[in-house]
């Protein structure tokens, strides 16, 4: 009795964490040395490997409970505070960075439980799969690691020959993995199908099938695909989606008319256009032969053998000359040739004039002179307007009109049109008298 009590007191008060695991094992050995009767060593619950025995072809669901891992981390410093540490999980196959292909994992938030789910196949039967589960406490930054041993069992009744896959629009995958929700769905399917054996084969999120993340409005869901299997033929209700009328409605993006939809509508909104009915007894198996290795495929020579640490020294001077010295020398030669062409091969103005015909030089000089003369005239505006721009005689009376611009009158600032306007206001045109008067 004393030995049994000491054994349990040690397991209760010395919880084996990463810091005192060595102390825990040492006390076990000391106690075993004093006990004469044979005693079997019992590991604590937190560090023992969990063994599960799923069946091939049947949905496997394992919940990673946060409460199970809270004992691995220190409690809150204040007494009475409720422990609500944010805990996340990382799962991988032991010795590998990821999980097996048939196993999936989901955890929405750090305050919710994680779920491992999937459907093992017959090729995994008899091979224990060890999954390492690492829990991270985001408050204390501590970790705890456990192992989950999955022993896949074979069954004679699986796979079931008739399989149907439903797409449920109003439920997410973690909600469907709950035992009560999955049980309600299987019960509704059983009422419609009436089989003797009915099992869930697989559950897949719509996001894994290429679906889009819904908008965060009106409580929209991602949707989930649920595959179930039975041992009897599909019911007439499930066959209604294959009728031409419903196929036409599905092609027009309209909901088909299904008589048994009311049995699901209360809790599950099924997209009947996406239902899939498969009879595996009529499926022709496809055997893929491994192709012959071509010339581009290396032979399998075993594991990679890295080179030894004692490597020979290598002279990189030749590589330096090829990569830097040679291109620099070529660039320098090109630079010299370009500089000589631009700076040392200029003809000059005198040589250019000597090679130009005289008539072309005369034309060029006359154009330059005319340009200079026009520029000088535009600068010197202190002259009177020419008389040719004014009327010389009256158009009616024929009298000679004297010029209106005296020599000392400044007209440089007066435009031509304004001058002519003033001129018309100064000239009085006599009206012609009628012949009677």
Image (cartoon, grey):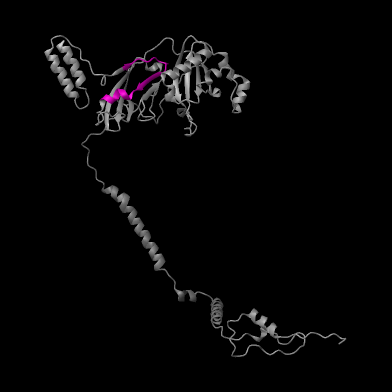
Horizontal side, residue 386 vs residue 198: left or right? right
Horizontal side, residue 399 vs residue 310: left or right? right
x, y percent for residue 334: 38, 59
Looking at the picture, does residue 215 appear above or below residue 167? Answer: below
Magenta-drawn stretch contains 335: no
Q: Which part of the image, by quadrant, shows the N terminus?
A: top left
Horizontal side, residue 240 vs residue 326: left or right? right
x, y percent for residue 267: 50, 21
Looking at the picture, does residue 118 appear above or below residue 375? Answer: above
x, y percent for residue 68: 30, 22
x, y percent for residue 401: 71, 89
The one nearer the camera, 410 or 218, is 218
Magenta-drawn stretch contains 70: yes
The one nearer the camera, 308 or 426, is 426
- For residue 281, say whether it is visible: no
Pick out the residue farthest to the right. Answer: 436
The one nearer the camera, 37 or 208, is 37
Tell me how many marks there are. 0
Q: Residue at x 57, y 15 (%)?
A: 237
Q: Which residues are magenta?
A: 51-71
- For residue 114, say whether it is visible: yes
């Amino acid at each position: 009795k004393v030995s049994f009590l000491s054994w349990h007191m040690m397991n209760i008060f010395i919880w084996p964490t990463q810091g005192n695991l060595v102390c825990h094992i040492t006390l076990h050995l000391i106690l075993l040395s004093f006990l004469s009767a044979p005693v079997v060593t019992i590991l604590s619950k937190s560090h023992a490997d969990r063994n599960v025995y799923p069946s091939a072809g049947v949905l496997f669901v394992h919940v990673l409970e946060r409460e199970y891992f809270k004992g691995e981390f220190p409690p809150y410093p204040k007494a009475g505070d409720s422990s609500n540490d944010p805990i996340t999980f990382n799962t991988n196959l032991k010795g590998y960075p990821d999980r097996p292909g048939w196993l999936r994992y989901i955890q929405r938030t750090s305050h919710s439980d994680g779920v491992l789910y999937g459907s093992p196949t017959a090729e995994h039967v008899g091979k224990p799969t060890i999954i390492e589960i690492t829990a991270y406490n985001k408050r204390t930054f501590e970790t705890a690691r456990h192992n989950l041993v999955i022993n896949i069992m074979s069954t004679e009744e699986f796979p079931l020959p008739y399989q149907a896959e439903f797409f449920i629009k109003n439920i997410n995958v973690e909600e469907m993995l709950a035992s009560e929700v999955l049980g309600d769905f299987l019960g509704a399917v059983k009422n419609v199908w009436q089989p003797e054996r009915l099992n869930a084969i697989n559950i897949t999120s719509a996001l894994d099938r290429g679906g889009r993340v819904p908008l965060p409005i009106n409580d929209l869901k991602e949707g989930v695909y649920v595959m179930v299997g039975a041992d009897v033929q599909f019911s007439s209700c499930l066959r209604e989606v294959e009728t031409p009328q419903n196929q036409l409605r599905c092609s027009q993006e309209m909901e088909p008319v299904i008589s048994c939809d009311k049995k699901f509508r209360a809790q599950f909104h099924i997209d009947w256009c996406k239902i899939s009915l498969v009879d595996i007894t009529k499926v022709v198996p496809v055997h893929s032969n491994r192709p012959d290795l071509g010339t581009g495929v290396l032979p399998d020579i075993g594991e990679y053998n890295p080179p030894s640490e004692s490597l020979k020294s290598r002279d990189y001077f030749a590589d330096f000359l090829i990569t830097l010295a040679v291109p620099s020398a070529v660039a320098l030669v090109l630079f010299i040739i370009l500089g000589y062409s631009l700076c040392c091969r200029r003809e000059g103005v005198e040589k250019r004039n000597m090679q130009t015909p005289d008539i072309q030089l005369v034309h060029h000089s006359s154009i330059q002179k005319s340009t200079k003369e026009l520029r000088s005239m535009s600068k010197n505006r202190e002259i009177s307007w020419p008389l040719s721009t004014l009327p010389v005689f009256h158009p009616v009376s024929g009298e000679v009109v004297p010029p209106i611009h005296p020599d000392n009158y400044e007209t440089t600032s007066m435009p031509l049109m304004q001058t002519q306007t003033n001129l018309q206001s100064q000239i009085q045109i006599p009206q012609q008298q009628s012949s009677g008067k």
